[in-house]
Image: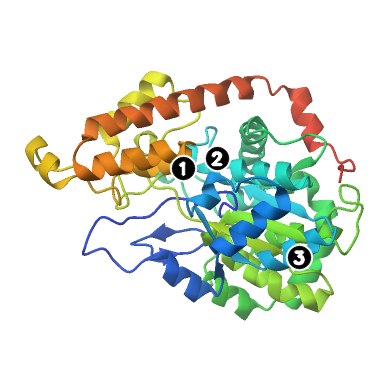
Amino acid sequence: MADLSTPPDVPATNDDQAPAPIVTPWEVSGIIDYDKLISQFGSRPISPELLARFEALTGHRPHLFLRRGIFFSHRDLEALLNNYEAGKKFYLYTGRGPSSTALHLGHLVPFIFTAYLQKVFNVPCVIQLTDDEKFLFAKQQKGDKPPPPIEHFMGLARENAKDIIAVGFDPAKTFIFSDTSYIASLYLNVLRIQRITTYNQARAIFGFTDSDNIGKHAFPAVQAAPSFSTSFPVVLGGAVDIPCLIPCAIDQDPYFRLTRDAAPRLNYLKPALIHSKFFPALQGDNTKMSSSLAESAIFLDDTPKKIKTKVNKYAFSGGRETVEEHRRLGGNVDVDISYRYLTFFLEDDEKLEHIRAAYSSGEMLSGEIKAELIKVLQPIVANHQTRRSEVSDQVLDQFFAIRPLEF
C-alpha cells in the first residue's frame, strides 16, 4: 500500500512560494490545508460533540490524538458508534507498507491509536503488511540497479511486525498478515472488487498511466479486500455483517473511496474511516521525511545520543534570529518542529499548554523547547526498543497464525 498505516513522506510547507499541495497515496507535498482536504475528499470533521459521545460510550477520555485534532476527519464514525451502542461489535483494520528495516516515530502514530481503540472498544484488529505493493511500486535503486526482489519485502514485513507488536496489541484479538502469505483467503474478495471496478475508475482515482506495470493497476483491490469481514473466514468467522473501522492517514482515503463505492454492489457493509494528519520531517514542512534519509526523522532504533543530536541539529525552529528578538516577539509554534512533535507525544495537556505559552511569549528559548522534546522522546524510543527485543519468533508466529480472534 502506499502506506495505510502512516503518511508516506511528509509535506513541505514553510515557503510562501511553495507549489500547490499534492496528496495521493504515494506522494504528499506542499502546504496542507486540512479543512480543504475534508471538503475535497467529502469526509467530515471530528466535532467536539462526537468526542463527547465517544467518551460516553467507552468510559475513557479520548486519546490525545483525538483531543489535539491529530485524528481530525472521518467517514461514518457516527453510524459505527450507533451500532456499537446497540451492542454490535466491529473490527479494526490498519496496515503498513514494509519499505525499511527501522520504522520512524511517524510510523508509530496510527498503530498507537489503533491499539488504543482496540483496548477501549474491546474489539479485534487485523493488520495488513503489503509486501506485494512495495515490490510492485519499488523504484530503480542507485546506479540503475533493479528494484529489490519480492523476498526482500517479505523479510521486511516480518521485521516491521516486531515494531507493530511492541506497540501493545492484544495477541488474542490481533491478526497480522502479509499479502503474499494470506492472498488465498483474500483472493475471492479481491476478484469481486476487481470485477466491478473499471480501468477508468482506477486511473481517475489513482492517476495510473499506461507505463505503470499491471500489478499497480490491480493492487487497490488487495488493499480494499480486508475492509470486508468475509476476507477473514477463520479469523472473524466469515460473517458478512461485521462492520469495519479503518484508522489511517488521510492520503490513503482514495483506496477506501473505491472500497466504499464497491461495498453496496457486493452487498457488503461500507467501512468507516478515521483520518490522521501528517507527521512532519525534522527539518520542517518544506522538507521530505524519508526512511532512507536518517537525519529527516527519529527512528525507532536511534540511541538516546542520536536522538539528542538530531533534535538539536535538525529540528526546524520557530525561534527568532537573536535571543533579544525572540524575547520580544516570541517563537512561532505553528512551524516549530519541537513543539509539533510534543503535540504528538507529550501526554500532559497542562504542560503542553505551558510550553506553548512560554515559547510563544519568548520566555522559553529554542534550545529549551528542544531539551523538553529530547526528554520526552528518549524514554519513548528506549521503552519501545525494550518491548521490541522481547518479540521472539514464537511471538511473531502467534500474531501471524490464522486462528479465530476473541470478540
Give the labeled residue for mark 1: 344
Amino acid type shown at disc 2:
Leu
Report the colour scheme.
rainbow
The answer for how far apart the CA atoms under marks 3 and 1 are is 29 Å
In the picture provided, is 75 more to the left or to the right than 47?
right
Give the labeled residue for mark 3: 82
Q: Quadrant of the N terminus?
A: bottom right
Residue 259, quarter of the rendered image: bottom right
Residue 108 location, x and y as percent?
55, 40
Q: Residues within 10 Å of mark 3 (few under 14, many from 20)?
A: some
In the picture provided, is 15 more to the left or to the right than 400?
left
In the rendered image, is residue 159 in sight? yes
Dots 1, 2 in contact, CB < 8 A: no
| Secondary structure category for the residue under label 3 | helix
The residue that appears at 61% across and 43% down in the rendered structure is 111
Relative depth, front residue between 16 and 199: 16
Residue 222 location, x and y as percent?
71, 59
Q: Earlier in the sequence, mark 3 or mark 1?
A: 3
Give the labeled residue for mark 2: 108
The residue that appears at 68% across and 58% down in the rendered structure is 223
